[in-house]
Amino acid sequence: MNSLNIYYKYILIEKELIASLKQGEASAFKVLVENYQDRVYYSVLNILHNATEAEDTAQETFIQVYKSISGFKEESSLATWIYRIAIRKALEKIRKQKNRQRLHSIVPWWMPSEEKSVDAAYLNPGINNENKEKATLIFKAISELPHNQRVAFTLIRVQGMKHEEVSEIMQLSIKAVESLLSRAKENLKNKLKHYYNS
């Protein structure tokens, strides 16, 4: 079977899945979760750097998908639409964390302090044991990037997505995504220069 036939077969299967989801078929939703749960989890883990937060966010993503599928207009692929929801949920979590941290700095006696976990390197199956320490430093530096830079860098450089895919997920032009990636790389180089020069 040539690549064009595989592509059309994939589109056909996806359209059937979407139709079944819109009809509220539980079996279709089960297939959706089985197909995307790991990808969604590792996408948000690489952004949030916290296993518990990533699990919560992945669950929230699928709840949102279940609630919103009837309004899915199929202007993008199903995967892009799901990733878009997941990234938005992850960024909402980050904003809430920042608000909690700000409030804690104002009234520390009222708000309990929260340890930020950087465990993405240790939970990511793609990173072998010898590289865990190095990866932890890199993930920590990534976690300190501005939101959009963090998302662009994570999706392209950590998860290996194409610029076009990330452009759709982030709803930005390819040029804007390239600019975010370039700034993220420059910021990371500055953050990690002490580690590499030591």
Image: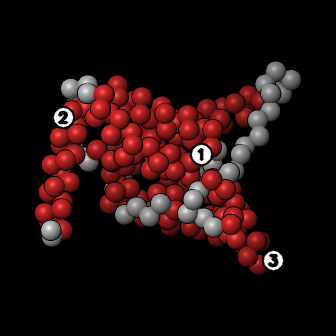
Query: Which mark is first along the chain, 3 or 1?
Result: 1
**Residue 23 position (above or below residue 163):** above
Residue type, label 1: Leu
> Hey, which residue is sitting farthest right in the picture?
109
Query: Residue 126 placed where, x, y %?
Result: 55, 63
The answer to which of 61 and 32 lies nearer the viewer is 32
Q: CA distance from mark 3 to mark 2?
A: 57 Å
Q: Secondary structure at mark 1?
A: helix
Furthest-front residue in view?
27
> Which residue is tagged 3?
198
Residue 86: image quadrant is: top left
Q: Is residue 78 above or below residue 67?
A: below
Which badge, 3 or 2, is on the more N-terminal residue? 2
The Cα–Cα distance between marks 1 and 2, rounded to whole angstroms, is 32 Å
Residue in view at x 37 percent, y 62 percent: 163
Mark 2, residues whose alpha carbon is within 10 Å: few (<14), some, or many (≥20)? some
Q: Is residue 12 left or right of residue 28?
A: left
Callout 1: 10 Å neighbours few (<14), some, many (20+)? many
Element at badge 2?
Answer: helix
Real-space Cα separation, disc 1 to disc 3, in angstroms: 28 Å
Nearer to us of marks 3 and 2 is 2
Mark 3: secondary structure: loop
Asked whether residue 123 is in view, the answer is yes
Name the amino acid type tagged 2.
Answer: Ala
Q: Amino acid at mark 3?
A: Ser
Tell me the colour scheme of the image.
secondary structure
- Label 2 sits on residue: 19
Please indicate, yes or no, whether residue 70 appears anywhere in the rendered image. Answer: no
